[in-house]
Amino acid sequence: MSTFIKLFFSLLLIYVAYLQLNDPDPYFWVFLYLICAIVPGISLFKPHKLRMNLFASIAAFFCFTAMVMSWHGSMEYLSLHFNNESLIQDMSPNKPYIEEAREFFGTLFALCIVLVFWRLDQRKTVNT
């Protein structure tokens, strides 16, 4: 995979972590996105397999944890509000499912990046 793609996804996740700084609960989300950013970032440097497995495992664990935390609200949004309301609106205490759906899909996106780079690293070490 090209260096540009690895760098792009790593920087994208760092940017998403930066955006979380204005969240009411930033520590968990900033850490989650930064640990996810390490996975494509570390693949730039031909990491030792153990190091990649460690960071990818930690990132995947945090992603799964975040998805479990936001599961209820995201399913409420998808089943009851998907056709009527956009995710792109101001946060409201009356609509917590909007924030939880955003968190769920953002985490799902980060998890996909982690899993793709983890799998590519596993394939690379098998083929060499």
Image (cartoon, grey):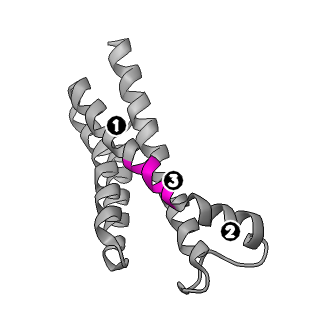
Q: Label 2 crowding class (10 Å Cα cut-off): few <14, some 14-19, many 20+?
A: many
Identify the element where label 1 is drawn: helix
Q: What residue type is labelled 3?
A: Val
- Position above or below: 48 against 39: above
Residue 49 part of the magenta segment? no
Q: Which stretch is magenta?
A: 62-69
Question: Residue, x 35% and y 63% (percent of image)?
Answer: 29
Point out the image quarter for the C terminus: top left
Q: Which of marks 3 and 2 is nearer the N terminus?
A: 3
Q: Main secondary structure of the magenta part?
A: helix
Measuring from the top left, give residue 73's x and y in whole percent. Answer: 60, 66
Residue at the spot of label 3: 68
Q: In this view, does 26 lie above or below 104?
A: below
**Label 2 element class:** helix
Label 2 or label 1, whichever comes before in sequence order: 1
Whole-number angstrom distance, CA of label 3 to CA of label 2: 15 Å
Label 1 vs 3, first from the N-terminus: 1
- Which residue is label 2 attached to? 77
Q: Which amino acid does label 1 sit on?
A: Ser
Residue, disc 1: 57
Q: Give the x, y percent position of residue 37.
A: 32, 51
